[in-house]
Amino acid sequence: MQNNTRKIMVMFLMLVFMLGSVTTAFAARPFANVPAKHWAYDALSKLAAGGIVDGYNDKGDKTITRYEMAIIVGKAMEKIEQADKDQKVLIEKLAAEFSDELKSLGVSVVNTTAPGQGTTRFGKLSQLPVNPVEKFTYTGRSYLFFASTKIGNTPATTDDKIKTDLKYQFKVNDKWSLVGESVWGRKMNTSAAVTTYNDEWTQMYVAGKVGKATIEGGVFKYPSPLNIVMAGVITGTQVSYGNEVKDVNVTVLSGRVSANPDTATYKSPRISSILVAGTINKTILARAAYVRVQPNVNQATTSNDYQAYLVNHGNKDINYYTVRFDTQLGDWNLMNAFSTSDAQGKTSKSGFMSKYIYKYADINVPGSSEAYIMFRRAPYLASYITLNDWIANTQGFRIGANYIIDKNVRLGAWFSKANDIDTHIKKVKICTQLDVYY
């Protein structure tokens, strides 16, 4: 009998606990959706139009949770002193509707007068938490790439692949963010994954403001002017100051090269650089950069003139100098860049790249298009890491076009022909690419 009594008491207590939990869950449902036709959406739209609520867009039939709605209402409550009489009535009505959710966020509401009189007191709104989802933003691009390359008299080779490039940012506060980029890819003419693209973290760094300077630290891309000297990834620190459009921007960086076309040959070389950019006569955007690389090449490898130079000179630091000029002439956008180094060898140490674009293919405007032609001369001693869609130590041209077949969908094709600077062997490449942006 005693055992049965204990069992009944245990079952009773469990039932009470379960009922209490269920009752609590039904009494406070912060993650329940606010119905699509709820008056709160219209109220927030009016407050947004009046500048009381920032960043709120009418979501149409898309609903949000009561918790998310309470956060937006809390932000409106912060600006009640700036509101007119009608706006104050809306804010107080919203605060009453979502009072339970506001309380769970630590916000108290005390109404001491008639609605709209402006004496409603709220809790510590500065401590109102922000939904972490609101801090996270991303952009991305996925594409199909088809290429055929022929070098000299050898049979043409194909390089067909699908690739996704995702860039994302988590806003820590008003000044600092965590920025990242991941790339996934697979060859379509083989069953093997593309090892250089598969699950690759290409960037991960912290960016923030200190006074008027912008600081980036971590793994990030280094864009020398038109990528003519270097198109690689750096592990280090970068500091920028100024605005290249309004006045002058100066960027200084120091670190090590993280991405290199031949990691068996180059052992994490050191790099330092200073880049200055500014506008000349409001029509020409000019950039100039100095790049210093400590190559640290493997002494046993001398597969080209560049590596031979490094070995013969004991891995002596190489200094690169590059300039770039951009301008607009009617429907033409003209870009020209030049580079040189203090290295000496059989090949030239000077190179250039010019790109002329006719019109502009706006990714947001279906039917828009552009055509372009490029000329490039890139000897080994004039650049450190070239773009992967150009073959090193060549000079030649590329001609291509892009067409926006639908919003955020671009179709492009190009043809390039170049000769090896040393051997004069002809290299031809034909590519087609379909890009989807999101």
Image (cartoon, helix red, strand yellow):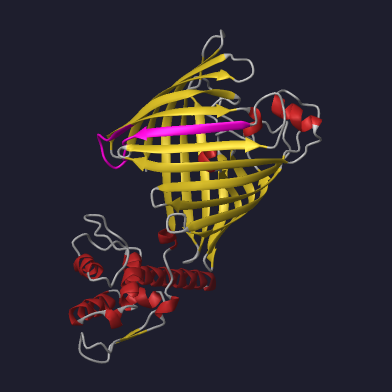
Q: Is residue 351 magenta?
A: yes
Measuring 34% from the left and 78% from the top, which residue is drawn there? 78
- Counting from the top left corner in percent of width and height, residue 36 is at 21, 59
- Could you say which is closer to the camera, residue 93 or residue 79? 79
215 left or right of 325?
right
Measuring 34% from the left and 73% from the top, which residue is drawn there? 75
Measuring 42% from the left and 64% from the top, which residue is drawn there? 131
Q: Is residue 146 magenta?
A: no
Residue positioned most to the top: 153
- Counting from the top left corner in percent of width and height, residue 35 is at 23, 61
168 left or right of 437?
right
- Counting from the top left corner in percent of width and height, residue 43 is at 21, 70
Q: Quadrant of the C terminus?
A: top left
- Could you say which is closer to the camera, residue 356 or residue 401? 356
- Counting from the top left corner in percent of width and height, residue 1 is at 51, 72
Q: In the rendered image of this protein, does residue 109 appear above or below residue 416? A: below
Q: Where are the magenta residues, as a range?
A: 350-370
Residue positioned most to the front: 281
